[in-house]
């Protein structure tokens, strides 16, 4: 005998089958593009100029530092700040303050030696010593790495990914005469049109290696990006790297749906202790003006925008229920 399905069960099955499936947004907040601002070498005015500018607009930056060259004191840092290649002119205390504000402290290897000229054993030492030093001083290990001079090989990158979740492998180098406000803003707008993650690489801000002709160029550019924050997600290199990895690895399954409600699961095989950046899930909800989402009785961030509901969810085993009206 064929199993009997009630009318209610049939309606429920038809509802799930015919519903527009939820999707994982390409970037957080279902924004068109993402940008990460990264700063190399630990130069003095990254702390005195760039950090305040980022804080003004609420952006978080990534600072790839060289532990061997971090300044011992502010006095030492000030003495070195005007050298063209004044590596390490931020102190550990200042780096801790930056981390407490939400900025990322990443690794630029232990000594900023070109890794493509080193033996595998020397490369390993550069990677591990840097990671361990930052972990000791900042209180947590760095998640990401930028290679000195942006030079690597597939073998060296593979070695690095045993210790870090991501390595910067493409970037827009800024500074000097070409880095006008117009040039930077044009590049930003192109990221939006192309739906890309753009990574900026800066060094000095006001004086020193690859400095801007005027530090106000950076401030004005950041304000332009801030004005487009509904389209552009600005976050640390580690956070965007984790989001994109989670997005590509996650499995999203619609379990049930009805008028004004949906239940789904979002799972991933990645290490939840590291890959814990919430993904934005988008559900069609024409006419909705408010929404709620919960998992295991706890509320999740949910918002209505342009006929859809957006819910920020970290991958996990428990189902998520969303309701809207």
Image: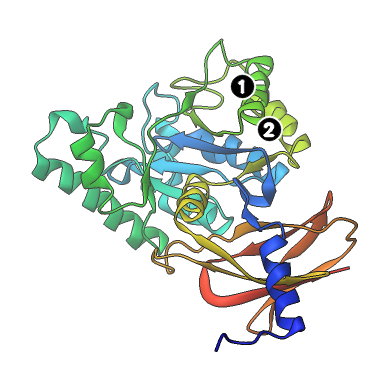
Image check: 306 left or right of 62? right
Q: Tell me the residue at 59%/55% (across/down).
A: 101
User: Residue 123: x percent and y percent?
Assistant: 16, 41
Q: Nearer the viewer, mark 1 or mark 2?
A: 1
Q: Say above or below: 311 vs 230.
A: below
Image check: 139 left or right of 18? left
Q: Tell me the residue at 53%/55% (across/down).
A: 97
Image quadrant for the N terminus? Answer: bottom right
Q: Which mark is first along the chain, 2 or 1? A: 1
Q: Tell me the residue at 47%/35% (across/down).
A: 39
User: Residue 99: x percent and y percent?
Assistant: 51, 55
Q: Tell me the residue at 74%/30% (across/down).
A: 224
Image quadrant for the C terminus? Answer: bottom right
Mark 1: few, some, or many residues within 10 Å (few <14, many ≥20)? few
The residue carrying mark 2 is 222
* 305 and 159: which is toward the camera: 305
- What is the C-alpha distance between the residues marked 1 and 2? 13 Å
User: Residue 130: x percent and y percent?
Assistant: 28, 49
User: Residue 109: x percent and y percent?
Assistant: 28, 42
- Residue 155 falls in image quadrant: top left
Q: Say above or below: 173 vs 303.
A: above
- Residue 230 falls in image quadrant: top right
Residue 300 seen anywhere in this rendered image of the structure: no
Residue farthest along the front direction in this orientation: 1
Q: Say above or below: 74 vs 261.
A: above
Residue 46 seen anywhere in this rendered image of the structure: yes
Mark on residue 187?
1
* 61 and 210: which is toward the camera: 61
């Amino acid at each position: 005998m064929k199993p009997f399905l009630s009318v209610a069960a049939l309606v429920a099955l038809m509802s799930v089958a015919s519903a527009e499936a939820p999707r994982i947004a390409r970037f957080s907040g279902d924004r068109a593009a993402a940008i990460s601002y990264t700063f190399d070498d630990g130069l003095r005015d990254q702390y005195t100029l760039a950090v305040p500018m980022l804080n003004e607009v609420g952006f978080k930056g990534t600072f790839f530092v060289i532990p061997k060259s971090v300044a011992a004191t502010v006095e030492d840092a000030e003495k070195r700040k005007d050298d063209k290649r004044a590596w390490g002119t931020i102190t550990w205390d200042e780096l801790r303050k930056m981390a407490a504000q939400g900025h990322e402290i990443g690794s630029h290897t232990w000594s900023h030696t070109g890794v493509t000229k080193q033996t595998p054993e020397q490369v390993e030492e550069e990677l591990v010593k840097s990671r361990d030093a930052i972990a000791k001083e900042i209180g947590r290990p760095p998640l990401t790495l930028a290679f000195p001079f942006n030079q690597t090989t597939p073998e060296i990158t593979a070695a690095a990914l045993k210790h870090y979740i991501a390595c910067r492998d493409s970037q827009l180098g800024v500074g000097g005469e070409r880095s006008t406000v117009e040039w930077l803003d044009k590049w930003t707008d192109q990221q939006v049109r192309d739906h890309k993650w753009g990574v900026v690489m800066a060094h000095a801000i006001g004086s020193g290696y690859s400095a801007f002709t005027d530090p106000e160029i950076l401030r004005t550019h950041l304000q332009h990006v801030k004005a487009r924050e509904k389209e552009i997600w600005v976050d640390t290199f580690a956070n965007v790297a984790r989001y994109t990895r989670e997005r590509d690895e996650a499995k999203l399954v619609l379990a049930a749906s009805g008028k004004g409600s949906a239940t789904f699961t979002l799972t991933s095989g990645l290490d939840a202790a590291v890959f814990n950046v919430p993904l934005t899930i988008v559900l069609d909800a024409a006419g909705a003006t408010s929404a709620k989402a919960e998992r295991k009785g706890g509320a999740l961030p949910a918002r209505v925008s342009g006929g859809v509901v957006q819910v920020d969810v970290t991958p996990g085993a428990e189902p998520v229920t969303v309701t809207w009206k």
